[in-house]
Amino acid sequence: MQGLTFDIAHMLAGSLVLVSFLQLYQDRLYALLNTFAMHALVLALSVAWQAYAQNAPHLYLTAAIALVFKAIVIPVALHRIIVRLGIHREIEKVVGVGTAMLLGIGLVALSMVVMLRVTAEADPLAREDLAFALSVVLLGLLMMVTRRNAVSQVVGFMSLENGLVLAATGAKGMPLVVEISVAFSILIAFIVIGIFLFRIRERFDTVDLHALDSRRGERL
Amino acid sequence: MNIDPVAAILLIPALAAALLAALPGYGLTARLNVIAALATFLVALSLFFTRPSPGLYLHVDDLNNVFVVLTTFVGFTTSVFSASYIAHELETGRLTPAFLRFYHAMYQVLMFAMNLALVANNIGLMWVAIELATLTTVLMVGIYRTHEALEAAWKYFILGSVGIALALFGTILVYMAARPVIGEGLDAMVWTTLVKRAAEFDPALLDVAFVFLLLGYGTKVGLAPLHAWLPDAHAEGPTPISAVLSGLLLNVALYALLRFKMLLAVNPNAVAPGPLMVTMGLISLVFAAFMLYRRRDIKRMFAYSSIEHMGIITFAFGMGGPLANFAGLLHMTMHSLTKSAIFFAVGHIAQVKGTQQIANMGGLTATHAVLGWGLVLGVVAIAGLPPLGIFMSEFLVVTSTFAREPWLAIVLVFGILIGVAALFLRLNSIAFGEPRGINAEAKASYVPMFAHLALVFAAGIYMPPALVAWFQNVAKLLG
């Protein structure tokens, strides 16, 4: 891999991790959606660069899906849902910003240690990509467990999926079937979530999952 | 007539789903659902005799043949049960006709997804199929639109998606490990090719991949501590779905895990997957056994019992070796049949009692003799009393463990006994004693329940040599 190509790919994948950190400390829903749009945009750029670097034109399609669908359609739709349903704009967190950031740093360190060690023989671009991808996945998970609000959990899940797409494109020559299906499953997942948010809103005064937790089936 | 049977077991449910989504009316659609399920089952049976050669996407071998036949059989009997169960739900107004159409279509989509996951020869395709099955069941669990159903569906959705995402990461890592050996492109995701060349893969990558796959698909199997979605999803969804979840979907996820275990087994330098599976299996077993004591909801109770049994099965496969694998396979088959029979009984019991709370049930054998004794038989079977099928499989698991790892066997027996005691404690208050609660008349179809129980009973007394030989062969394949 030539110097510049590698550096740019490295930088883009690194920026994705950075934007994941940005998402971690947002406390307003709209700001969170904007950061998610940025996340998807960086992903699209990164995938497009991989398409160029690996000379794999089908990856441009994946990049386009990320750009149109995740950076534009979903944030706009979620924005509308928030307005239409009058969901509270503030995000309730389980742990403070400081703790969440420290945990996040720990997770990134962990994924570097694990992935760089096991992929010692793979080509350098794929190694870095996988390590960054795992960081994004773990940060997405962290976001899902530290938020109580349904919309921000969904955003956490989507950024987790972004990490997976990064991993899939980093794995050189991975068949297109899988990429399209990943994108497709996100679409389905989003529809499902949309329906659920609606139904949840019909029944509860808040999309705050804490309100749901108080009604566990077991308790009488 | 020259139709590929593998294509047929996928096409029949897919076409039926499209048709059922379009047709109105209860009587017709319920019957159509049963017919489609029966047709799929019959075609699946034909796989024992003719089997197409493996392609890039689909293949059938001795291992998944067993799974496919079991899945389509329970799918068929559940559709019969579902017809009478849903008729009652319509009468009481818990489901509206619009949702009914959706329900039947989803039922067939679920069948399609599970069959696809089983016959997929491509690890990416297998992942897509399991994801589809998850989304379908999420929608079905939430179908009653109550607070609890929505909460259960949401929890299932979030945990299931995270699990499935981790499994995808594992799948990508397997591809990364295969790429330098097999080359880029589709071939490096074809399972039959992977397993031939797995010895040359980078062991470190395979190890990490397996950890992700175990956590990911393990969530879907319901292994503790990733089981949190399972009791809620079982308790709040329609009972036919609980039966299919427990009896089939958990198996399908376990099947995916077994496929990857076989990959690691081929590679001499990779970590042995057995101890990881043994540990998670034992934790699930003991944890679920203790959790059985405090259940107040009958469907939740049997959901925990499913976690317990999936723990035993995972444990058996983790131990490995021809005998333990044989026991695991047998236990899986028996558990599927018994647990779905129990859910058939529980579904009708909850309907006649108008509640799922154990406190409001009592003396069922006196008021509803057939249902009550059906449940008693089912619980006796699931508890593993002789001479029923589960006794035999549990006995095999325990004895094969005693021969190799006596300490593990002690934990295993301890967990099983704790679980059995809890089940009988609850069964006593449900089935015997003074009748309590409402006693509506039962309009049930008993055939599916007793058909399953009869099979379990028969298997405990006499296993046909052909079946034994088949299972032994599969057990050898599993390594």
Image: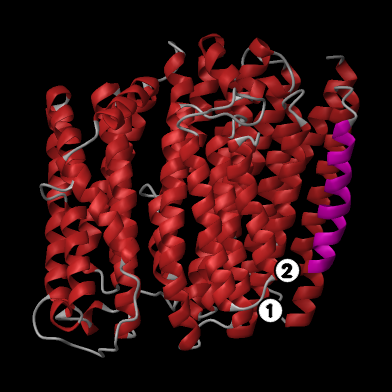
Who is closer to the viewer here, A90 or B107? B107
Which contiguous range is marked in magenta? A58-77
Task: Report crowding for label 1: few under 14, some 14 to 19, many 20 or more residues within 10 A (C-alpha).
Answer: some
Q: Residue sitting at 34 percent across and 85 percent down?
A: B354
In this rendering, the count of numbered labels is 2
Q: Which residue is mark 2?
A: A29
Pointers 2 and 1 within a single chain: yes
Q: Which chain does the residue under circle 2 lie in?
A: A
B58 in magenta: no
Q: Quadrant of the C terminus of chain A?
A: bottom left
Q: Amino acid at mark 1?
A: His
A74 in magenta: yes
The numbered disc on residue A88 is: 1
The scheme the figure's colours follow is: secondary structure
- At which x and y percent is residue A19? 75, 47
Q: Residue sitting at 83 percent across and 35 percent down?
A: A47
- At which x and y percent is residue B116? 59, 42
> Can the viewer see residue B86?
yes
Q: Secondary structure at mark 1?
A: loop
Where is residue B254, by image quadrant?
Answer: top left
Q: CA distance from mark 2 to mark 1?
A: 8 Å
Q: Amino acid at mark 2?
A: Leu
Q: Residue sitting at 68 percent across and 22 percent down?
A: A127
Q: Is residue B314 above or below residue B466?
A: below
> Can the viewer see residue A101?
no
